[in-house]
Amino acid sequence: GAGVSQSPSNKVTEKGKDVELRCDPISGHTALYWYRQSLGQGLEFLIYFQGNSAPDKSGLPSDRFSAERTGGSVSTLTIQRTQQEDSAVYLCASSPSSGYGYTFGSGTRLTVV
Amino acid sequence: KNEVEQSPQNLTAQEGEFITINCSYSVGISALHWLQQHPGGGIVSLFMLSSGKKKHGRLIATINIQEKHSSLHITASHPRDSAVYICAVTMDSNYQLIWGAGTKLIIKP
């Protein structure tokens, strides 16, 4: 498609379960970011992929969070043993490089019950 | 028509000028966000607004809920303010974020 695609758009899971969130960036975009927004909060940086370089994982809040990007394209954000505080909208964005021209996905709303 | 529209798309100004970036939206929202992205950098959340006005340093953000409009102002602009400024809204129906296309700001010394 023409934009950044995230799936699912909504996910409700039970506390303690693992979840996977997917991001399909725009073809050819080398930079990919994951952010999250908790209810009533601003955006929180999670992780950044740039080409084949080692990702910047400095924003991951705990070791329950991990992300990978296969073949420099699709990225999966995995949250293990989900907690209620993980409930948020998880956003993905991609760009041709670490410069201008970011395109954002519409997010995955995760609710942990 | 995009649900979140920003203007201008590009803005070049001289150091010291007062800068205004506008954002209009057409959906019901619970919050509006202003974000900043420098070249090569991540996205920084500047403000989250649901009403009124907020100020942080040289940055001021205002929102008029009735008119569905927000403005981001930069006073005494500096070359380090050069970045892309993005307006995004949190929909009040499903908490999804809708993003504006961004405004590319260049401040010349």
Image: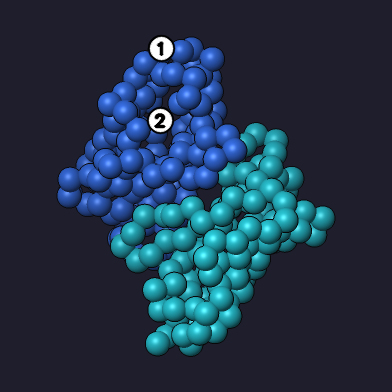
Chain colours: A blue, B cyan
Q: Would residue B8 be visible to someone looking at this image?
A: no
**Position of residue A12 in the picture relative to residue B108 (left or right):** right
**Mark 2 Cα-neighbour bin, 10 Å: few <14, some 14–19, many ≥20:** many
**Position of residue A106 in the picture relative to residue B4 (left or right):** left
From the top left corner, tell me how far across and down residue B51 is, in percent.
72, 51
Residue highlighted by disc 1: A16
Q: Is residue B65 above or below residue B40?
A: above
Q: Quadrant of the C terminus of chain A?
A: top right
Tell me where residue B71 sits by quadrant: bottom right
Cα–Cα gap, marks 2 and 1: 16 Å
Chain label for disc 2? A
From the top left corner, tell me how far across and down residue A46 is, in percent.
36, 40
Amino acid at dot 1:
Gly
Q: Would residue B60 be visible to someone looking at this image?
A: yes
From the top left corner, tell me how far across and down residue A95 is, in percent.
36, 57
Chain label for disc 1? A
Amino acid at dot 2:
Leu
Local SS, label 1: loop
What's the residue at 52%, 65% (across, down)? Answer: B57
Which residue appears farthest toward the front when viewing the image? B57
Residue highlighted by disc 2: A21
Tell me where residue B83 sits by quadrant: bottom left
Q: Is residue A83 above or below residue A2?
A: above
Q: Is residue B103 above or below residue B43?
A: below
Which residue appears farthest toward the right when viewing the image? B66
- Label 2 vs 1, first from the N-terminus: 1
